[in-house]
Amino acid sequence: MRKLLLLEDDTLFAQTLEDFLCEEGYEVTVTHDGVLAHALATEERFDLLLLDINVPRLSGLELLKKLRQAQHDRPALFITSYQQRQMLKEAFSAGGDDYLTKPVDLEELKLRVHALLRRSHTLPDRISLNDSLWFDPVRYQLFENDQEVTLPKKCAELLGLLVAHQGKTVTTAMIEETLYDYTEVPSSGAIRVYINQIKKLLGAQRITNLRGVGYRLEKE
């Protein structure tokens, strides 16, 4: 499981990001203080740093400068309300790899996190599902013998969720939150259709139906 360090002093926003990223299969450590974030990043090896800039005691910029001076090479994504070009220039000069401005689109955050992890070689380009099928975890695309298998968007998103939690239970609530936004009414019937499509591709034995709870993608 990939480990992320999140530095964000807005407690409610930090909780939102933590919940979302945990549902995507990451282990997230949250701190609201730059000095504490520096200590954590020094003591423990994280796969990705998510940094706010304006935080107590040590700014996200100064934190990353210190880490880069100490040869800390993990990718860093700034999440900030600053939009001025000079501030963004400073973020990259400090060693940042990417940035998002608030308010954050969570789907865009997911894609940028995937891209940074893959670029740093901590996320595989492909995840093998069996001898002929593999899944691209960034673009949510399924391939069979290097030929793309066309899937409905929500079916691909469900497969991505199952792959991210392979061997673990994915609850119905997690599925609904991933597949449907606040303007849509979740459909248990549609979810069953997507599950059946995935079973046809992977084999029925790979998907365990935990009645009233959710589903689990079994390891091959």
Image (cartoon, helix red, strand yellow):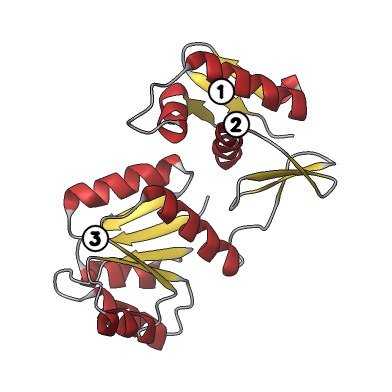
Q: In this view, does 14 lie to the left or right of 97?
A: left
Q: Do the residues labelled 3 and 1 touch (CB within 8 Å)?
A: no
Q: Where 111 sits versus 63, above or below?
A: above
Q: Can residue 118 be seen in this view?
A: yes
The reply to whether the C-beta atoms of the residues labelled 1 and 2 are less than 8 Å apart is: no
**Which quadrant would the C terminus be assigned to in this image?**
top right
In the image, 176 versus 71, the foreground residue is 176
Which mark is nearer the camera, 3 or 2?
2
What residue appears at the point 52 percent right and 11 percent down from the top-left corner? 211
Q: Is mark 3 on a helix, strand or loop?
A: loop
Measure the alpha-carbon separation of dots 1 and 2: 14 Å
Q: Mark 1 points at which residue?
A: 215
Q: 125 or 49, which lies in front?
A: 125
* Res 46 visible: no
Q: Residue 216 in the image: x percent, y percent?
A: 59, 26
Q: Name the residue under label 2.
A: 155
| Residue type at numbered disc 2 | Cys
Rendering coords of residue 179 (x, y %): 47, 32
Q: SS of the residue at dot 1?
A: strand
Question: Who is closer to the viewer here, 116 or 210?
Answer: 116
User: How far across and how far down the image is residue 83, in percent?
Assistant: 25, 72
* Badge number at residue 8: 3
